Amino acid sequence: MSLIFELSKKGLKSFQAPPLDVPRQQSDLPANLRRKTPLRLPEVAENQVVRHYINLSLKNHHVDKDFYPLGSCTMKYNPKINDEIAGHSGFAALHPKQPTETIQGALQVIHELSEALCHITGMDTVTLQPSAGAQGELTALLMFRAYFIQRDGRPRHKVIIPDSAHGTNPASIVMAGYDVVQVVSGPDGLVDLDSLKKILDGDTAALMITNPNTLGLFESQITEIASRVHDAGGLVYMDGANLNALMGIARPGDMGFDACHLNLHKTFSTPHGGGGPGSGPVVIRKFLEPFLPKPVLKIKDEHFSWDWERPDSIGHIHSFYGNFSVMVRALAYILAMGRDGLRAVSENAIINANYLRVRLAEHFDLPYNRLCMHEVVFSGSRQKAHGVKTLDIAKRLLDFGFHPPTVYFPLIVSEALMIEPTETESKETMDRFVDAMKRIAHESETEPEQLKNAPTATPVQRLDEVAAARNLDINYFAQPKTSAKRG
Ligand SMILES: Cc1ncc(COP(=O)(O)O)c(C=O)c1O
């Protein structure tokens, strides 16, 4: 397929700008930073632009095209109406520096979303500033640090995570200046309480735990775990990125958590993983409120304003107030679904994952074969015995038009295949997926080469993923054209 630059023909245009009706202004940029030559943009007609990008999008896999069961990512189909609402000029054309008198409606959106998230999680208050789950984790840990310094005069130095933890957890802990301490999971895939008891002490700042965990299992001893940590003087943090499994059924606040982040870009109607803005609000208990990032939204006599006088705040962690358009989508989604609708989302996410668990159990190893929550983790060990790697299984799925599941995570499952169907998929779609997986299981025994050479039906075959990530080739003008082998 040609690049858009290769379609360029001098004089073609896709737009018509109105004539300039204001005085032309000289740029304030220093002369050495200004362009010497005009920007080399492709010159193409409107239909070329549309067709080019439609065709390009069809070469990729996306949830608008077919099933995307990428475990731990909640790649569900999001209603387009919420994009439309977020794009309304009353929201999209606001400037964050506008006087608050002129943005009362937008502040009301932030306020109502905050209330809804506290209600859904059973927590007291929230910051909407973090722009991702990982940044939410860091924000909460910085608040914990500030809290301990105020309470005990020292931050404590250990944060405990299970061996099934998501990779962002240890990274956030280190960034917040804490040491990572790992607690093992028992044979049931849940945190081993006895091991936890042994490592809890007066240096434990927190336990950070995902519930449901990354095996898709609900930590059934969570209230006991939380009280053990509290008895040691520590705090309990929930990585709530998997809230899609809990809404309307169970609340972090009732499980004993002190803080929890949510991924609006997974659970609440913003696409996850598209490279666009996300939002990782942190809901907390009242006693942590003084440490919230500032400014904090306040309401007096039905008038919203920003409170900057927060002497104990950890400071500002995002420009302005967070990613507002993601918040608009989330509120629109929550209001449209209502309490019963959100519960139905979680129930159906759980039912769908269990449907796949049961239908595929005969064909793939299932290290933890019991009722799961929103995702199920298989192992490709049986296929490995035939020389087929889990990566081969993932690549072969592309030939059948499906996005592969997450592979090789969580780390405690060898040859892991982590499947999250989400509530938005029908039985018919999951049945097609089951058929493809069964065929792959069969091929691994009968024609393993087929899998090792997969994918063959995609625009490009196997890529050198390390080189693709390390030697990015995205500048048309900077690269020698001969190196560009494009499908
Ligand atoms: C369990 C878990 N924790 C944390 C995160 C990190 O979220 P983000 O990618 O928004 O930083 C994810 C990502 O999906 C996740 O699945």
Image: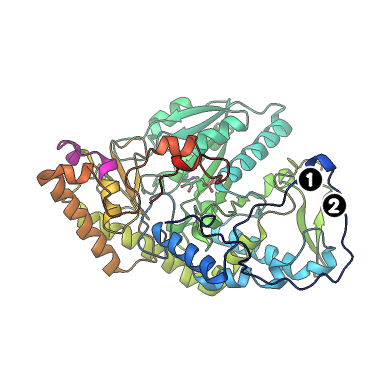
Query: For residue 471: magenta?
Result: no
Q: Nearer the viewer, residue 136 or 253?
A: 136
Q: Is any atom of residue 111 visible in this view?
A: yes
Residue drawn 56% across the image and 57% down it = 122
The kind of residue on which mark 1 rests is Arg
> Is 327 rendered above or below residue 160?
below
Residue drawn 18% across the image and 46% down it = 450
Residue 76: x percent and y percent?
43, 61
In the rendered structure, the answer to whether residue 351 lies left or right of residue 126 reads left
Q: Nearer the viewer, residue 468 or 249?
A: 468
Instruction: Report the residue that reaches farthest toward the right.
Output: 23
Magenta stretch: give its range.
Answer: 382-392
Residue bearing mark 1 = 34
Residue bearing mark 2 = 27
Q: Element under label 1? A: loop
Q: Spatial distance from mark 2 to mark 1, Cα to Cα?
A: 9 Å
Q: Nearer the viewer, residue 144 or 400?
A: 400
Instruction: Report the residue that reaches farthest toward the left.
Output: 446
